[in-house]
Amino acid sequence: MHGQNVLHRDMKTSNVLVCKTGQTCKPVLADFGIAKMQTGQTVTAGTQGAGGLTPAFAAPEVLAAFAKGTPLPSGRAADVFSTGMVVFEAVYGRAPPARSEPAFAMPPLPPHPNPHVRDLLSKLLAGDPAARPTAEQALLHPLFADSSHLAGEIARQHAATAFHAANGGTTPYPEMRIGFEVLHVESVATAALEAKFVACRRMLETGRGRIGVKVDAATGANERFADQPPRCGAELAEAWAFVGCGDAVVQPMCDNGRIPPGHPLNPTPPTDAGWFGDCRRGVYVGTCSDYVLKYSNSMVPLSVGDEVRVLVFKVLPGKVYKCAGTETGCAPKEGFDSHMSPHDLEWYLPLEGQSCPAFVLTIKAIKLVGNGTADDS
């Protein structure tokens, strides 16, 4: 559900139905009456009141807002908490415990013979929304180790959803009735790059120790940026970005990340100075998945049947400077953490560790017919 950018907002046991087909039982989530769509950092307008709120299952931050008469928060973490309450009832066989103002915190969990149960519930039911796992992370908990096949399926769905959600309908694909199918997903996990990504988040959180991506070939020194006010909220949110490149570059990029031209690990000279930022002092990633496909296809848009590989990066844009037009070769803007191109197609990222490869996708161009479905004939 979250992979489709849907927030349920009323997760509870009575909304989980079990459908039986032959000997197979499948849980189905019902009642999307107050659900909302979330794309990136934006949540669609919808029911703001408590018409569908079930207090016994609601997250602490939701109950606190309701008690104060303020707008109810909408976020994936609230759904995760409510799902934890459903799990609580399932494993303990009794309704979730009552909680009281002002914190509406959970009381200590009862004992359980499986230590993984209490560990998972302690994470799902954390009082701090930021401390709760995502739905995808929860499914990879050791409690589900005997269902390890979930890991690959979750990764595939998560990456495919990210690709399709970021399809911007860039020319010429809508005019040619061309859509895309995700044929294969490969997860990428490079410890050194993950550590840099964590360090970049810390730089943004504290505003201190900001390091640029450029490494001077002569001295090996990283570029230093001035301290900034600490980032919080939306300015700390992760986002997906996309990079198209030739097959020969895919593995080096998985190993080393996105590197500016002229860097010792990427000695290829730049093709230009950078339309929205100095390309020797930062890297470019695409915000629209279909926009980058041509970079994996010798700068030619895909035709039906073409297959290419693209990389999916998780990025930390921070505070974004929106370019009004081309600003060829400009330095990273003081007071900002990234630049956005005028048509929202590219981010320019100047900070060390600001992007980290997460997936490699194999994409096939397909012909769309009718209302946008694939033509399988």
Image (cartoon, rainbow, N blue to C red):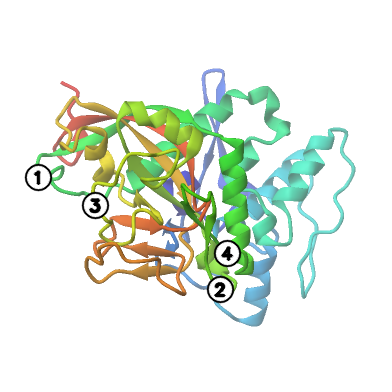
* 353 over 64 or under it: above or below: above
Label 4 and label 3: CA atoms lie apart by 29 Å
Q: Provide the secondary structure element on which disc 2 rests.
A: loop
Q: Is residue 57 visible?
A: no
Location of mark 1 (residue): 175
Which quadrant would the C terminus be assigned to in this image? top left
Instruction: Point out the frontmost of discs 1 and 2.
Output: 2
* 32 over 103 or under it: above or below: above
Q: Residues within 10 Å of mark 4 (few under 14, many from 20)?
A: many
Q: Residue at x 39, y 31 (%)?
A: 250
Say whether disc 1 or disc 2 marks the residue closer to the N-terminus: 1
Q: Nearer the viewer, residue 200 or 372?
A: 200
Location of mark 4 (residue): 204
Specify whether 1 is left or right of 177.
Answer: right
Q: Residue at x 62, y 68 (%)?
A: 208
Residue 10 in the image, given as x and y percentages of width and height: 57, 57
Q: Amino acid at mark 2?
A: Gln
Location of mark 2 (residue): 228
Q: Amino acid at mark 4?
A: Leu
Label 2 and label 3: CA atoms lie apart by 29 Å
Q: Amino acid at mark 3?
A: Asp
Q: Check whether the beta carbons of the residues at disc 1 and disc 2 lie within 8 A of each other.
A: no
The numbered disc on residue 155 is none
Residue 40, picture quadrant: bottom left
Q: Residue at x 30, y 43 (%)?
A: 269
Say whether disc 2 or disc 4 marks the residue closer to the N-terminus: 4
Most distant residue in the bottom direction: 69
